[in-house]
Image (cartoon, grey):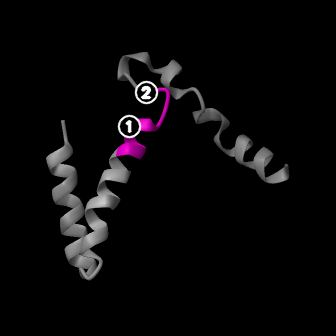
Amino acid sequence: VRSAYASFKRYENYLFTYEKYPELNIEKTINRIEGLFKQLKDKLRPHSGLTRRHKILFIQDFLNKKSW
C-alpha cells in the first residue's frame, strides 16, 4: 500500500494531463503505444543475435516506418 501511495503522489500531477490540454489530443489510455511496442518486440524477437548498434538501427527504422 505504501508503494502504491508513493507512486500516486509522485505522478498525481500527470494523471489527467489529457484533460488539462485538450488541444494536444492526448489519448486517455496507453493502448496505442502498448500495441506499437508489442509489434516492435514481435519483429525484433527473431533477430536476437543483433548487436546493440544494429538493434538501435532496427528500432529507428521501425519507428520511422510507423510515424504518421
Q: Identify the element where label 1 is drawn.
A: helix
Return the x and y of residue 68 as percentages of the image width and height. Answer: 18, 35
Report the front residue among 13 and 28. Answer: 28
Q: Is residue 11 above or below residue 18?
A: below
Q: Is residue 68 above or below residue 42?
A: above
Q: Main secondary structure of the magenta part?
A: helix
Judge the density around disc 2: few (<14), some (14-19), many (≥20) Cα neighbours within 10 Å: few
| Residue occupied by mark 2 | 27
* Residue 22, magenta (yes or no): no
Q: What segment is highlighted magenta in the picture?
A: 28-35
Judge the density around disc 1: few (<14), some (14-19), many (≥20) Cα neighbours within 10 Å: few
Q: Which dot, 2 or 1, sits closer to the camera?
A: 1
For marks 2 and 1 on the same chain, the one whose residue lies earlier in the sequence: 2
Type of residue at label 1?
Arg
Return the x and y of residue 26 as percentages of the image width and height. Answer: 41, 26
Type of residue at label 2?
Glu
Report the front residue among 64 and 18. Answer: 64
Residue at horizontal 79 percent and vertical 44 percent from the top: 5
Residue 32 tag number: 1
Residue at horizontal 67 percent and vertical 35 percent from the top: 12
Look at the numbered discs 2 and 1 and tell me whether their residues touch, using CB distance below 8 Å. yes
